[in-house]
Image (cartoon, coloured by chain):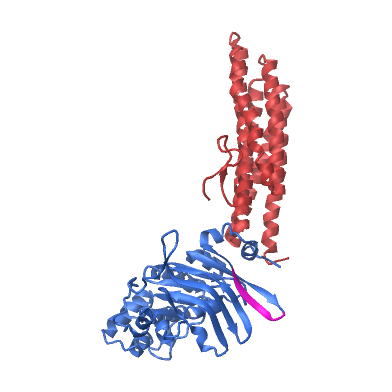
Chain colours: A blue, B red
Amino acid sequence: MIEDRLRERSLREAPRVPSFEIGSRAVEDPSDERILIEVRDLHVYYGSFLAVKEVEVPIRQNEITALIGPSGCGKSTVLRCFNRMNDLIESARVEGEVLYHGVDLYGPDVDPIEVRRRIGMVFQKPNPFPKSIYDNVAFGPRIAGFKGDMDALVEDSLRRAALWDEVENKLEESAYALSGGQQQRLCIARAIATSPDVVLMDEPCSALDPIATLKIEELMRDLKEDYTIIIVTHNMQQAARVSDRTAFFSVDVSEEGRTGFLVEFGPTSEIFTRPQQKQTEDYITGRFG
Amino acid sequence: MSDVRAQFHNEMAALEQELLGVADQAEQMVGMAVEAVCLPDMDLAAQVVQLDSRIDETYLDVHNRWLRLMALQQPMAGDLRMMSVLLHLNTTLERMGDQCVNIAKMAQITYGLPRSETIIAHLREMGDLVRPMIRTGVEALVRRDLDEARLLPAMDEPVDRLNRNLYKEVVLCGPDPALLEWATRMMLVSRALERIGDQVVDIAEQTAFLLTGEMMEFNEESFPGGSPIGV
C-alpha cells in the first residue's frame, strides 16, 4: 500500500530525486506533464466557519507554483493543507482530497509526520533553532533516524541551499549569528535535509531585504530541478519572476465571514499578461472594489 | 471601485491622450501633404515639415515617460498590454509623420514641373481614403472596439489597389521627360500614402491585441477573423 510506504520508508531509502515508482496513480494531464499533487474539491473549516471552498489545483512535478491573492483569501490555509499543518490547529477540518502520488494525504492511515518529511516547509520569518548551523541542518535527519554520513548530508544540504560557501568555516557557530537572508537559506537547507519531494514556502522573503530576496528566488529556480515548490507570496512581481504556474485566490465576504476560493489557475505568463477572469485582472492591475 | 494604482493609471492615460493628439495631428498632416503636392503649395509643404518636428519631440518625450513607467510601475495584464500598445503607437505615429514629410519633400522637389491632372486626382482619392482610416483606427482604440478595428483592412484595400494601379497612369507620361520625372516622383507619394494605410492597420492590430491578448495579423488572407501569431 502506498499509505504503508508513506509511513515506513526510511530516510535512507527515500530518494533525493523523487522517484515515480511510488506514484503509479499519478495523474497525467493533456500536456503530458506529471501532476505530483492533485487537490480535489478542497474545503477547509475552522470550527463551523468555512475558510476556503472548492479548491482544485494540480501541482506539477519540478515546477514552482505560486499561490497569490488578497489577505484572507485562504492561500496560506491551502498551502498548509499540502503537508497537514492545519492538523496542528484544533478546530481546523479539511474536506476533499489532497492526492500526493495518487495517495490522499488525509487518508486514515497516513502518518502526518511522514507527510511533513516528504513535503517540507519554510516559513515567513526565518526560524532557526537556537543551535549551531550544523545542528540545525542535522536536526531533522537525526530525528528520522538517519544513520549515514551526517557531515556529507549537512554539506550537501547547505550547498543545495546556496549557503555552504558562506558558512563552511563556522558550522559550529550559532545560527542566530547569520543574517536574515542566510537564516532563511539555512531553513531551506534544514527543510531539504530530510529529502523531501516538495518544499512549501509561506512568504519566504517577506522579512528579507531585496538582495536576500533575489538570492532566495535564484535558489528556488535551482531547487526546482530536484524539488517541487509551492510558494505563497504577497509580492506579485515575485510570483511573476519565479513561478511556472500561478493560482489566484479571492475572497467572498458574507455575514458568516470571509471565505477564500480559487478564481483562476494557469501558466504564470498567461495570468500576468492575459488573465481570463476579470477578478484576476482587477487584482493584478490594482483595481479592487 | 477603488484604484490602488491610481497614479500609474493616470500617467498611462495621459500617455494615451498625448498619442491620440499626435494621431489627430498626423491625420491633419496627411491632408496638408497631399494638398501640398496637388495644388502645389510650398507653404503647406513647409508646415508639414515643421509639424513633423513637433511629432518627433513628442515621440522622444513619450518614449522617456513610457520607459519610466515600465521601470517604476511594472505593469501587468491589461495594463501591460496597454503599455505595449502605447509603445507601438508611438513608433507608428512617428513613422506616419515621416511619411508625410516624404510627401511634402516630393512637393518641393517637383515644384514647377509639368503635371498630370489624372494622377493628381488619383493621389487626392488616396488621401481621402487614408485620412478616415486614421480617424477610424483611433476611434476603435479610444472606444476599445474590436469590431471597428476589424474594419481597417477593408478600408485599406482600395488604397492598396490605387497604389498598385498608379503605374498605368505614369507610363502614359512617357514621351515628356519632365512630366515623366514628376510622375515618377508621384509614385513615391502614392507609396507613402499606401504605407500610412498599412500603419493604420497596424494600430488596429494593436487594438485587437489590447482587447483579446492575442496578436492578430490583419492581412487579406485572414480577414475578417485575423490569425493568431502568438503573444
Please check the rendered image and state whether residue A257 is part of the magenta-colored stretch, yes or no: yes
Task: Say whether residue A9 is visible.
Answer: yes
The image quarter in which residue B47 lies: top right
Query: Measured from the top left, where is residue B98 in percent x and y?
Result: 62, 35
Secondary structure that dominates the magenta span: strand
Please check the rendered image and state whether residue A149 is part of the magenta-colored stretch, yes or no: no
The image quarter in which residue A4 lies: bottom left
The image quarter in which residue A179 lies: bottom left
Look at the picture and state if A224 lies above or below B136.
below
Residue closer to the observer: B142 or B117: B142
Residue at 31% across / 76% down in the picture? A15
Query: Measured from the top left, where is residue A24 in percent x and y?
Result: 36, 71
For this view, does B26 lie left or right of residue B184? right
Residue at 63% across / 85% down in the picture? A48
Span shown in magenta: A255-262
Residue at 41% across / 62% down in the picture? A33
User: Quadrant location of the N terminus of chain A?
Assistant: bottom left
Look at the picture and state if A250 lies above or below A174.
above
For this view, does A17 lie left or right of residue B122? left
User: Quadrant location of the C terminus of chain A?
Assistant: bottom right
Query: Measured from the top left, where is residue B106 in percent x and y?
Result: 63, 25
Task: Say whether residue A207 is visible.
Answer: no
Residue at 62% across / 77% down in the picture? A72
Residue closer to the observer: B176 or B171: B171
Query: Measured from the top left, where is residue A236 in percent x and y?
Result: 56, 67
Please tell me how many numbered marks the rendered image carries. Answer: 0
